[in-house]
Amino acid sequence: MKRRETKYLIVGGGLAGTILARTMEKYGQDFILVDNPGKSNSSRIAGGMFNPVLFRTLGKTWQADEIIPFAHGFYPEFEKELNQKIYFPRKLVRILNQDEKAKWAEASKENDFLDPEIKSYFSQDIVLQPYGGAAINQAGNIDVKLMIESYHHYLKKQDRLKLGGVHCEDLAIHSNGVSWKNIHAEKIIFCEGFLVENNPWFSFAPLKPAKGDVLLIHAPQLKTEHIINKKVWIVPLGNDYYKAGATYRWDDRTETTRQDTLDEIITSLEKFLNVPYTILDHQAAVRPTVGDRRPLIGHHPEFESLLIFNGMGSKGVMLAPYFADHFLQYLTGKREEIMERVDVRRFQRTWDKNKGE
Ligand SMILES: Cc1cc2nc3c(=O)[nH]c(=O)nc-3n(C[C@H](O)[C@H](O)[C@H](O)COP(=O)(O)OP(=O)(O)OC[C@H]3O[C@@H](n4cnc5c(N)ncnc54)[C@H](O)[C@@H]3O)c2cc1C
């Protein structure tokens, strides 16, 4: 097999690896992406929403003022390049409870992502909303699966995508980079989702994976283009199909569906959805959530050629474009440091402590 040289070998082609690859392309960097689709499916089943509001506090999500405008620039441009409809800016309507209704007006003075108007966005015989609903500005959703498939198709044609699993025992670390099979790369960047827990170099980062289930439903009488949120969410997919989810389980690292989570989604839906629907599919996957809920980006504490871009948790759609750009600025020398809050070396002490074991 002919030896191939590249600057970056990206391992994992979910949302994180795919957006990193796309950003590398924008920065004119040389890379090969290796993906083993099906090993972890968080990106492929995700709701794909971006929502800059924390409903618990009605405040903004972390860094939302920078991250949200960035996402609204990134996805339409990517959509154009892919020639596929993947970007759906739309209203996200929160079905309010009594407490939220009381706090909304005040909170909207502080948080410009909250539309101050409270009203009935739906007729009561379709969606129950005794306290009305209110919209989140600048929300929307991405067709993540289509984005990944379309970009991988494009990369395949350019011979920049390899299918298969990278096993750490097949990697050799040299003074000038790493090699895997016939590929030699200056740097390898792991984007393995929650499977990073099996990676001997980066498992020191404290992942707290969160399994989630989603349903594909058909609800011909719902007729809405809005995302609906009340404990669970409903995202329109077109032609009366919707995604509905999601659950959180912290004690299960399998991607098999569960009856208790199915029941949980149905119970939540039935509290507000007042029209019949049919469940067509039920899927589950594991989110790569970090103990401190911030991404994991940057160099291994000891091996400079090993890097990571992971830990997007439940907000990969919003976080990945902004932090891929941040990472590329760093990798190309346009910025000196990776933001401390996301730098994987914030957990260096765990690596130092465990490496002798
Ligand atoms: C039910 C559910 C709903 C969600 N809804 C939303 C939402 O609405 N909005 C949002 O922002 N986020 C949502 N998320 C979270 C979002 O899915 C994640 O933030 C994001 O997808 C993580 O992407 P990732 O690429 O890091 O991981 P993954 O999607 O797990 O991708 C990792 C990829 O790497 C491959 N891989 C792993 N190890 C190797 C290896 N050694 N060699 C080769 N390939 C490898 C895997 O097979 C996979 O293709 C949701 C998640 C779930 C489970």
Image: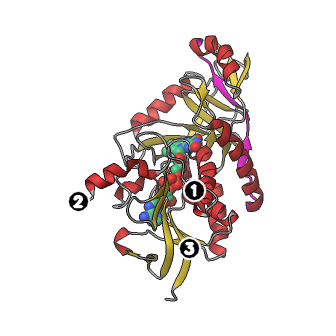
Q: Amino acid at mark 2?
A: Gly
Q: Residues within 10 Å of mark 2 (few under 14, many from 20)?
A: few
Q: Give the secondary structure at mark 3.
A: strand
The residue range painted magenta reads 82-98
Q: Position of residue 20 (x, y in %)?
A: 59, 59
Residue 293 versus residue 66: which sits nearer the camera? 66
Q: Quarter-wise, where is residue 136 in the image?
A: top right
Is the C-beta of the residue carrying label 1 under 8 Å from the nearest atom of ligand 1?
A: no
Q: Nearer the viewer, mark 3 or mark 1?
A: 1
Q: Residues within 10 Å of mark 1 (few under 14, many from 20)?
A: few
Query: Which residue is labeled 1 in the image?
Result: 336
Image vertical order of residue 134 relative to residue 72, above or below: above
Residue 30 versus residue 34: which sits nearer the camera? 30
Q: Position of residue 33 (x, y in %)?
A: 55, 68
- Give the distance between the C-alpha atoms of the residues marked 3 and 1, in whole angstroms: 19 Å
Q: Give the secondary structure at mark 1.
A: loop
Q: Position of residue 28 (x, y in %)?
A: 68, 69
Residue that sits furthest to the front in the current view: 336
Q: Amino acid at mark 3?
A: Lys
Residue shown at the point (65%, 61%) measured from the top left: 22
Image vertical order of residue 52 relative to residue 281, above or below: above
Q: Which mark is residue 7?
A: 3
- Which of the marked residues, 3 or 1, is nearer the chain's N terminus? 3
Q: Amino acid at mark 1?
A: Glu
Residue shown at the point (66%, 14%) measured from the top left: 106
- Give the distance between the C-alpha atoms of the residues marked 2 and 1, in whole angstroms: 31 Å
Q: Give the secondary structure at mark 2.
A: loop
Q: Position of residue 138 (x, y in %)?
A: 72, 35
Q: Residues within 10 Å of mark 3 (few under 14, many from 20)?
A: some
Q: Which mark is residue 356?
A: 2
Q: Nearer the viewer, mark 2 or mark 1?
A: 1
Report if the CB atoms under discs 3 and 1 are less than 8 Å apart: no
